[in-house]
Image (cartoon, coloured by chain):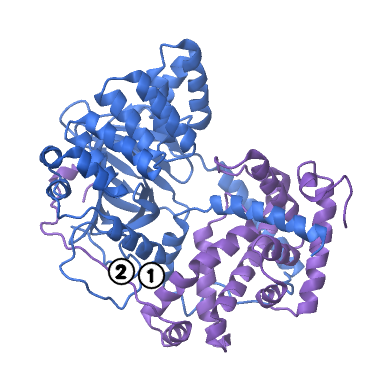
Chain colours: A blue, B purple
Amino acid sequence: MDDLTNRLQKLGAAVAEVSDRTADPATLPNARRRFLSSSDIAEPRRSLGPLLGGYRVPLIAFAGLACAALIALFLWRRDPALSFSVGGSHEPGSVGQWVAPEAEAPLDVRFSEGTVVTLTPGARMRVTDTSTTGATLLIERGAIHAAITHRDSDTRWSVRAGPFEVRVTGTAFDARWDPATETFDLSMLEGSVIVSGPRLPSGRVVVAGEQLVVSTTKMELRAGAAPTAAKSDPVADAPLAPSAPSPAPCVSPDTPSPVASAASSSRAADAPRADGSWKALAQAGKYKEAIAAAEAAGFAGEMSRASSTELRTLADVARFGGRPALAKTALLSLRKRFGARGGSAFLLGKISADQLRSPGEAAMWFDTYLQEEPGGPLAEQALGRLMEIRKRDTGAARLLAERYLARYPNGAYAALARSLVGR
Amino acid sequence: MPPSAAPAERPRTSSPAVVRVLPQVRDDEALVRGVRAGERWARAALFDRYAVDVERILRRILGYEVHTDMADLVHDTFVQALSSFDNLRDPGALRGFIQAIAAHTAYRTIRSRKVRRWLRFWEPSQLPEVAVDDVDPDVREAYRRTYQLLDRLPADERVAFVLRHVEGMDLGQLAETCRVSLSTIKRRLARAESRFARAAGRDEVLRSWLVEGGRWTT
């Protein structure tokens, strides 16, 4: 092998590494769903032409195509971004501003192409971005009902809640986000969406009639009759890892996604066993009782025997059960024994800030998260929390705010960041 | 349901059932038989077994481009594969067959991109920044510039170059994937390498990857 070939292969290996990091985890689930639900298999959209070399477009046809494309491009570029109004107001809503019902009545947010999002009392939401093909919504708290208008195949809507993201084309669904328990609840009424986030690294297709309840600690998918439920395709929509126990193992003739089956089997092997009492109580969502049971059994001993997943569950049990110091101990053990990074640092920051009232330590942990997972799903929140903690330190706060606005100009903390930059 | 109604009023499922599907292992021969017989499980198994390869080949040949819907291209590849199954004589060659169709899909996409760029006056030099944060900035820049140069190569040479140097195929696999003879693929690859090396020599970032001792080795 000559020098040039060697060097090209070295460059190629570097290119391959970056390329692999640009892979979108939603690609395969999305393609799989389309492929298995499509009826055009017998008549593909294009025939298999000559391979790699013999393809020629007649000049006249090409010129015609070019003219048509130029006209289409001209028309496309004139298409404005969606606008929206809140409640009965005729004034256009502002991107980035809070939207929340003032009274006990639901509040409608109406978009120019027909989409309506209804906030229930107590909910808070922001429209963080709009484009010609859709918008991005951020649920900060509470429940919304969305009826998204599907105009064409380019329709692109996205709903974010904490670390979870729902990618939508045209559909109707209810979504609820509880920041206290970090639980996202999605009930599909029409169409389908892809949900991604912690425990759903490859994305999960949720179709009409299904309800997905997912948090940073557990995931449950329920299939049942919903008011407008469409027929679900069990092959196209094989579940990732339902947490509720199956009555008996059964082998389906259908083959699940390799990502799904791998995730399923690894999680099944690593899932907390329901034999210990604190584990059973934790699975039932009885966190106060679970942490009491863990202490009764000897917290240190339970920690030393726990697998990484069990240790993480134990930390959550302590966190939700009102014992932040124990949660911190469990997370530190998770980092020390199993080398956990990223999410554990974020949680330590959150516990320090919200429960232990120790802003200095919280800032250190949020900073650690940003160093360990600079592009992670919680990076925006970590940077925002860090900025909030250090807002009295003018110089540091300004730098953090500039960094935040550069990455998340329409993020949940953008207003705070602008106020820090402008003072 | 009217969109303005509150979600809380909507009836919920009273006793939800949990769906669980377990995997089954089948060899390529059974898989090909199943696909030809129109079995639904076979389509699912075909996708699950080869989708990772297909997506990787498409992504590596095409590079990062915000306008490309990769899921659509993966879907297209499998639709083409099913419609061309009659051309598959040896079920043992299924992987190569699928890879060839993925490479052809990428080739076709490159050609249509070039037309689209011409129509929109969009130069390859305006390729978007790569949306990855945890990569050495020098490597990320080398990646971006590599695809800038690849954009200037003819589509068939680009496919050959990437499959050889990024995907790491040997010459036999490469010829099979591009469906040409070994001698043809050697000539095509040599042309691609030569063009790429000349252009990289004028690029301040890529030069450091390919030059040693201040002297070109071509």
Q: Nearer the viewer, residue B78 or B111?
A: B78
Say what amino acid the circle numbered 2 marks. Asp
Say if B49 sits above or below A392 in the image: below
Q: Residue at x 89, y 48 (%)?
A: B215
Q: Is residue A103 visible?
A: yes
Left or right of residue B44: residue A141: left
Q: Residue at x 72, y 45 (%)?
A: B125
Q: Where does residue A263 sit, x and y in percent of width and height?
A: 36, 59
Which residue position holds label 2?
A233
Say if A65 sits above or below B41 in the image: above
Say if B191 sits above or below A288 in the image: below
Left or right of residue B177: residue A262: left
Which residue position holds label 1?
A37
**Quick one: label 1 or label 2, which is nearer the N terminus?**
1
Left or right of residue A175: residue B212: right
Say what amino acid the circle numbered 1 marks. Ser
Q: Residue at x 59, y 58 (%)?
A: B59
Q: CA distance from mark 1 to mark 2?
A: 8 Å
User: Do tag 1 and tag 2 residues touch (Cβ < 8 Å)?
Assistant: yes
Left or right of residue A105: residue A239: right
Q: Nearer the viewer, residue A36 or B169?
A: B169
Of the 4 image quadrants, the one containing the C terminus of chain B is bottom right
Say if A125 sits above or below B88 in the image: above
Q: Nearer the viewer, residue A42 or B96?
A: B96
**Crowding at mark 1 (Cα within 10 Å: few <14, some 14-19, many 20+):** some
Q: Where does residue A46 sit, x and y in percent of width and height?
A: 57, 73
